Image (cartoon, rainbow, N blue to C red):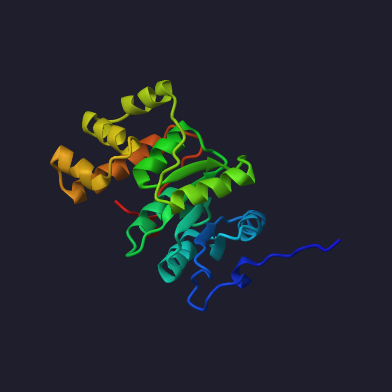
Amino acid sequence: MTIRTFDIRASRRALDGTALGGAIRVLVVDDHTAVRIGLGGLLEDRSDMEVVATAASAREALADAARVAPDVAVVDFHLGDGDGLTLCRAMKRLPRPPRVLVYSAYADGPLTAAAVVAGADAVLSKGTLGEEVVRTIRTLAHGRRAIPPIPRAVLRSLRARLEPADQSILGMLIQGITPSEVASVLRISQSLLESRRTAIVRALMAVTPSGSSLEPSLRWG
């Protein structure tokens, strides 16, 4: 039996980091080596996917995303130098922002809501079967979202922790309304909306065991 070793950074790709053959370019971000190897191997076995880079930290991931412009970034929530939601927001500010899948062991209602506010396009639990991860990446690559439903009782509880104006912002973002449309509907500036999104994420993450503080070096408020 042949034991396959897999080094994502040595995987097939062009010199500039772009995928070969028009495949979906994927960036994998996780501070656990075993997860990077396992997830990278899973994706590399798909003919329509190419892992163009992996990263163990938020800082490294943001640099990689700017360098190789992946189509989809699979991002762990807990990272050694920050958190996946802060990283998601920073990636969304890039000239060529990737679609972002937040991949966490704590994919609960509060994290899902906070991820949507941060700009994530999908949320999955690390307990999800590999085929579901593959399907979700394909969904994102085709421009769609994959946000799990948040139970009404949980959503009501989360809204109750927010100011009335922020409740409206949360509701619209969860329904898939773009930030620019939200700002237009509420007649507020983009900078004010960004500030309110920061406050909403902090409030939502304060009520879930998956919460953590925002990393100052990547703060997006």
Q: Horizontal and vertical percent for residue 180?
A: 22, 47
Q: Residue furthest right?
A: 1
Task: Identify the residue at image location x=39%, y=39%.
Answer: 114
Tell me: residue 139, above or below residue 170: below
How many marks on residues?
Answer: 0
Q: Horizontal and vertical percent for residue 186?
A: 16, 38
Q: Horizontal and vertical percent for residue 167?
A: 27, 31
Residue 77 in view in this figure? no
Q: Is 127 in front, or is 26?
A: 26
Q: Residue furthest left?
A: 187
Residue 31 in view in this figure? yes
Task: Identify the residue at image location x=35%, y=63%.
Answer: 96
Task: Identify the residue at image location x=32%, y=24%.
Answer: 160
Q: Horizontal and vertical percent for residue 41?
A: 66, 59
In the image, is 205 to the left or to the right of 168?
right
Q: Is 201 in front, or is 170?
A: 170
Q: Is 1 in front, or is 187?
A: 1
**If the image is split into quadrants, where does the N terminus sit?**
bottom right
In the image, is 31 to the left or to the right of 18?
right
Q: Residue 39's quadrant in the figure?
A: bottom right
Q: Is 173 in front, or is 218?
A: 173
Q: Residue furthest top?
A: 153
Q: Residue 215's quadrant in the figure?
A: bottom left
Q: Residue 9's quadrant in the figure?
A: bottom right
In the image, is 169 to the left or to the right of 128?
left
